[in-house]
C-alpha cells in the first residue's frame, strides 16, 4: 500500500529540522545580500535599513557573509526618542498623541497602560520606526506620545475596542501636525 501524505507528520518533521538550525534566514535575505545592497544597522534598536526602509530582524548580523559591510546609522525613531529624552525637541517631538481619560479606577488605568505597552511591542515588530516615546500618568488620564501617527490612532482604536462604551475622538490635521486621539472611559 502506498504511503499517504500526512500534513501533520510533515509539519512535525519541518519543526524537528528547524530545531537543528541555529538561525532561520528569511527568503529575501540571501537575495538582498547577494545583490550587494547597502545595509545599515541602528545601534540602539538593531533595526536594519535596506530596500529604502527600516526592518526588524535582530539575528541579521549573525548570518552576514564575511566581508559584507554594514554601516551603523541611528534610525529616525531613535533620533526622535533621544531628542525627547534630552528635552531639546523642536515644536513637536512626536507625530502622534493619545490622551486616555476618565480612568478613576487604578485597576482600569493599569490595564489600559498594559494594553498600550502590548500594542507598542507589536508595532515595533511590524515597523521599528513606530515606537512609543513616552507614557505620562496624569492622575485620571494617561498621555501617550508616539513616533508615528498611525500608532496613536491604533492605540485609541484598540483601547476603545477593549473597553466598550467609551468615547473615541480622532483629530487629524490638514498640515504637518501630530494626530490627536482622545478616548474617554464610560462612567
Image: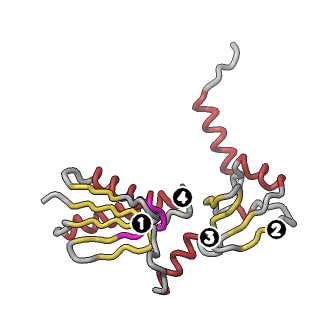
Compared with residue 79, is residue 27 higher up or lower down, i.e. above or below?
above
Mark 1 sits on what residue? 178
**Residue at disc 1, secondary structure:** loop
Mark sitting earlier along the chain (2/4): 2
**Residue at disc 3, secondary structure:** loop
Q: Is residue 67 left or right of residue 6?
A: right
Mark 3 sits on what residue? 75
Q: Quadrant of the C terminus?
A: bottom left
- Tag nearer the camera, 3 or 4: 3
Q: Quadrant of the N terminus?
A: top right
Q: Residues within 10 Å of mark 1 (few under 14, many from 20)?
A: many
Label 3–label 4 contact, CB within 8 A: no
**Residue at disc 2, secondary structure:** loop
Question: Toward which corner of the image does residue 128 lie, by quadrant?
Answer: bottom right
Mark sitting earlier along the chain (1/2): 2
Mark 4 sits on what residue? 125
**Residue 151 % position (x, y):** 43, 59
Q: CA distance from mark 2 to mark 4?
A: 24 Å
Q: In the depicted view, which residue is nearer to us: 91 or 82?
A: 91
Q: Residues within 10 Å of mark 3 (few under 14, many from 20)?
A: many
Q: Residues within 10 Å of mark 4 (few under 14, many from 20)?
A: some
Q: Which residues are magenta?
A: 144-149
**Residue at disc 4, secondary structure:** helix
Q: How is the image coloured?
A: secondary structure
- Tag nearer the camera, 2 or 3: 3
Q: Residue furthest front?
A: 175
Amino acid at each position: 500500500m502506498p504511503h499517504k501524505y500526512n500534513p501533520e507528520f510533515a509539519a512535525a518533521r519541518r519543526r524537528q529540522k528547524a530545531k537543528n538550525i541555529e538561525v532561520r534566514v528569511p527568503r529575501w535575505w540571501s537575495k538582498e545580500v547577494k545583490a550587494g545592497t547597502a545595509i545599515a544597522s541602528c545601534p540602539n534598536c538593531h533595526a536594519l535599513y535596506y530596500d529604502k526602509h527600516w526592518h526588524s530582524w535582530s539575528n541579521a548580523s549573525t548570518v552576514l557573509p564575511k566581508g559584507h559591510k554594514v554601516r551603523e546609522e541611528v534610525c529616525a525613531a531613535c533620533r526622535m526618542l533621544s531628542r525627547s529624552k534630552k528635552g531639546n525637541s523642536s515644536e513637536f517631538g512626536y507625530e502622534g498623541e493619545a490622551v486616555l481619560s476618565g480612568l478613576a479606577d487604578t485597576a482600569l488605568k493599569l490595564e489600559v497602560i498594559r494594553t498600550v505597552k502590548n500594542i507598542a511591542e507589536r508595532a515595533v515588530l511590524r515597523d521599528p520606526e513606530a515606537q512609543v516615546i513616552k507614557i505620562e500618568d496624569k492622575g485620571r488620564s494617561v498621555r501617550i506620545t508616539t513616533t508615528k501617527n498611525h500608532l496613536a490612532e491604533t492605540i485609541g482604536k484598540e483601547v476603545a475596542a477593549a473597553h466598550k462604551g467609551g468615547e473615541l475622538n480622532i483629530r487629524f490635521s490638514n498640515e504637518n501636525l501630530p494626530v490627536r486621539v482622545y478616548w474617554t472611559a464610560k462612567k
